[in-house]
Image (cartoon, rainbow, N blue to C red):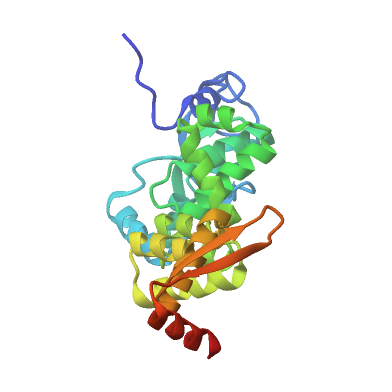
Amino acid sequence: MKTKRTGLGRGLDAILQSPDTDITSTDISGEFVVGAIASIALDKIEANPFQPRDTFEETSLLELAASIKEQGVIQPVTVRKLGYDKYQLISGERRLRAARFAELHEIPCYIRLANDQQMLELALIENVHREDLNPIEVAVSYQRLIEECSLTQEKLSERVGKNRVTITNFLRLLKLHPNVQIALRDKLITVGHARALLNITEPEKVLLLLNEIIDKGLSVRQTEDLTRNTGVPKPKIIRKRNPVHEFEDSVKILNQKYGFKVTVTRTPNGRGKVHFSFRNEEEFKKLVQLLDR
């Protein structure tokens, strides 16, 4: 039977289950055994220097803090042991902050060992699977995994359990104008709006369109139509007319202007003659009058 892939991706599971990061032997450098779950004092846990998130919504943290006061911390945070009674957060920044808001003294922790490279990768991978992460934070996390963990997009796809096209689309968001990234981060526009704006290269046009999207509350479809209309105009194709057609049109103009049958003969070098046909003396006099005007 085929094993179902977990949402965290094979890379994170490998780190969590690796002998290098999950040592369960007795540890004499502190009170708790590495690999155990234990309650650790908040003041003994350092912040994660590799934390990819730089913003946490205070209202959401206060709501979580209220829940923690009522029910406690249900899911332990993950820490690594640095030395005697000293720990550093790997994942669970939001729960740790909410616990401080709730004025707890201790928090349940899953204790592991990890080097700096594993710390960064573990924190970033754990981060991109959070539902409350905005698209720019996800894109930055993907970019950091590629650059700082030396991963190709193909390897990153395997690590996080995401389609490579999905990863590419997120990375493209980092090419957006900074104001568009801020609007996306602040939920003033959606990813669909942002992708439509990727088609516009002139910064001035991008900002004008961004303001119009926000002010008028344009849908993604309306934005796509707008960006198509304001995109780089296609060069107008000037079709040269067939010389034969031009000659025939000129003869028709002479016929219509004078009201007589006109015959034009031309030589290859451009010389020629114009012949007017008339049926009687009266028509001849009329033709002379017309040509004399």
Q: Residue at x 52, y 54 (%)?
A: 136
* Residue at the image point whose x is 58% and y is 53% from the top: 174
Q: Is residue 173 above or below residue 250?
A: above
Residue 231 is at least partly visible in this image: no
In-image side of 67 versus 161 (left or right): left
Q: Which quarter of the figure is the N terminus placed in?
A: top left
The residue most toward the top is: 1
Q: Is residue 290 left or right of residue 6?
A: right
Residue that sits furthest to the right in the current view: 269
Locate residue 99, reporting x and y percent: 43, 55
Q: Residue furthest left?
A: 70
Total residue callouts: 0
Return the residue nearer the eye: 72 or 140: 140
| Foreground pick, 220 / 237 | 237
Pick the residue in front: 242 or 258: 258
The residue sitting at 48% across, 24% down in the picture is: 10
**Residue for point 60% across, 36% down:** 121
Q: Quadrant of residue 33?
A: top right
Residue 150's x, y, as percent?
68, 33
The part of the image, by quadrant, that contains residue 4 is top left
Q: Is residue 286 above or below residue 202?
A: below
The picture places residue 55, in percent across and down from the top left corner, at: 51, 61
Q: In the rendered view, would you say 140 is above or below 145?
A: below
Residue furthest out toward the front: 281
Question: Can see residue 76?
Answer: yes
